[in-house]
Image (cartoon, helix red, strand yellow):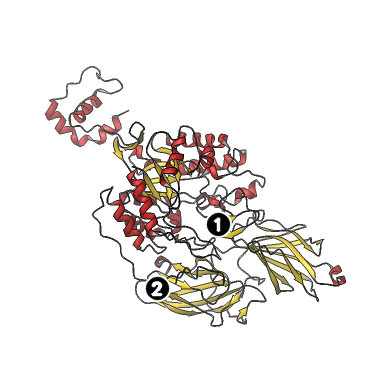
Amino acid sequence: MFSSVFRLNAMFSDNWIDKYGPINYPSRSPVPDLTVLDYYFWRMIKSLDLVWRYGFDVDYDNNQFLLDGKPFRYISGSFHYFRTPRQYWRDRLRKMRAAGLNAISTYVEWSLHEPELGQFNWNGDADLVNFLNIAQEEDLFVLLRPGPYICAERDMGGLPYWLLREAPNIKLRTKDADFVRYATLYLNQVLNKIQPFLRGNGGPIIMVQIENEYGSYYACDTEYMDMLKEVFIKKIGNKALLYTTDGATTAFLRCGFISGVYTTVDFGTSSNVTNSFLSLRLYQPRGPLVNSEFYPGWLTHWGEAFQRVKTEAIVKSLKEMLALGASVNFYMFYGGTNFGFTSGANGGEDAYIPQLTSYDYDAPLTEAGDPTTKYFAIRDVIGRYLPLPNMSLPIVSLKGNYGPVLLEPVMKLLDSRSPFVVVQASEDQPKTFEALSVNQGFVLYETNLPPSISDLADSAILRATTKDRALVYVDNRLRGTLSRTDKIFTIPLESPYGRRLSLLVENQGRLNFGDEINDFKGISDVTISGTPLTNWNMTGYAFSNVSFPRNITTIRIDSGTLNDGPTFLRGQFTIIGQPLDTFLDTTGWGKGVAFVNGHNLGRYWPSVGPQITLYVPAPYLYAGENELIILELEYVSQSRKMKFQPVPNLGTL
């Protein structure tokens, strides 16, 4: 069993022959399980005190971790590779190492890697292997969190939408046969990919998390957790330490705990450090203390103030934890961006609040990867407990000021020639996005109003259960908006009532936390003054490649409210020299989606805020001519311009 290891060290052969003399092999090795040749290598390496093994273990007697047999404590930071272009992975990791961190933590997002059933993606910004290679090259260990559920403020907590299509009655995150089957197939794909990177194989991955904050989920399905444990053990063995993470109360730990798996907790600056770790000790009596998610910032939703955590509070709690000998992971150390339609939402049956496109998180490194005063304050504390690397410290990078771009209307979204239609269907009742195989984006639901509506003496009342937001048109004219967030599920329709009813429904992000993550999108229970509406035509739209011919004819629209439907507008801008990161200012517009050179920057909604600008990374830009396309849903700025500026505005300017 040692042959391959020793023969890789054949460089030592001349030395050990000089030391031990010519090779006169005994008839058999005096050490069991070693060949005769291996025995001589073993003697040589023992004499040089070079016998070792890679591994990451727990020394329960001394309440510490052991890295390759030596005491070890990690101070880590969360960075999700899928939230920044792969061209920036090394830059962000290097800045984290310069802060004194010796490890990083990342989720692995199921929906990114298996966007459709059986169609796996490990390329480009989904190249997990490349990310792990870079982490190791930058002298960082890795805490891997492959789920299958990750939360992460991502659509459906990182679970793929097609689970709801393939098995509409599926019980997510339980021993439900469908869920376990699909999750096992996904996990095996991930765990096979990461084998060479496990610490036991000489790689950077020291810990692998099973599930995520399961104690916060209603199911409390211990059989499910044990099933997952077996999947992980089969692939990981003792090559890395398996662990769980839950909130620091007995209520959360009770259902998140897995026998034989290392238990950790998470908490922020508002929690008492001592009491939080006392809760942990009820389930993990011995071993090092670990806070797997220490929050130096917080997430923000549309319509609320940008969330901040004070540096002084972070420093105080960090000092307390490190003084106790704890290992700590900052969530997030670098947040990044929810590009495209990947952001999730919080809430449930009685509330719904979607999250921003930005995932800046008020983290020590900004959305654009710049260090903050918080970054340097944290580094100062870390330097008291771990040796700081001999590296140059990061500075704020130069940003591009590319000025205003005039946007000309080129196409209506609901145009019959739209190239973005991906599905059309007709049914008696409206189908969900998931049943239509529409993951993100929009579905148009259309039917005829009943002739009997003309007999109503008063206004007709349209009612629809809406997930999440619907623009309501009658005969192609806007009549109002239904909103799950604002709990607006009815609107009056005034006479003359017209004939054709159209509801353009937007998926604003599936719930990512709580008991209702099986968050189907669309409309249901649609009535006019109590009369059910049937015979629906449905059209799904998706935006994987947004572009228009250069010679496309512009169309005529009025600025202000878009009464006759969402519109694509396009403009060009020129960059001289090497492109720089920049920020797209959406001030004065309504609500929509922006694309630069085909890259979906995400949703903008300045009329609600707090986020006003969208982050534009330099890898999305070209030296020379560039193209900005927006899909505006509700309101066109009087100037018809957006501008690229060098500073962000997340509602804090």
Name above or below for residue 168 compared with residue 580: above
Q: Is residue 256 left or right of residue 295?
A: right
Q: Which residue is mark 2?
A: 646
Q: Nearer the viewer, residue 504 or 268?
A: 268
Q: Residue at x 33, y 67 (%)?
A: 396
Q: Position of residue 361 (x, y in %)?
A: 45, 59
Say which element carries label 2.
loop
Name above or below for residue 426 compared with residue 204: below
* Kind of residue indicated by mark 2: Pro
Q: Residue at x 55, y 45 (%)?
A: 216
Q: Nearer the viewer, residue 21 or 501?
A: 501
Q: Which residue is mark 1?
A: 344
Q: Is residue 542 left or right of residue 387?
A: right
Pick the quarter of the image with the C terminus.
bottom left
Quadrant of the rendered structure where residue 592 is? bottom right
Q: Position of residue 518 (x, y in %)?
A: 62, 50
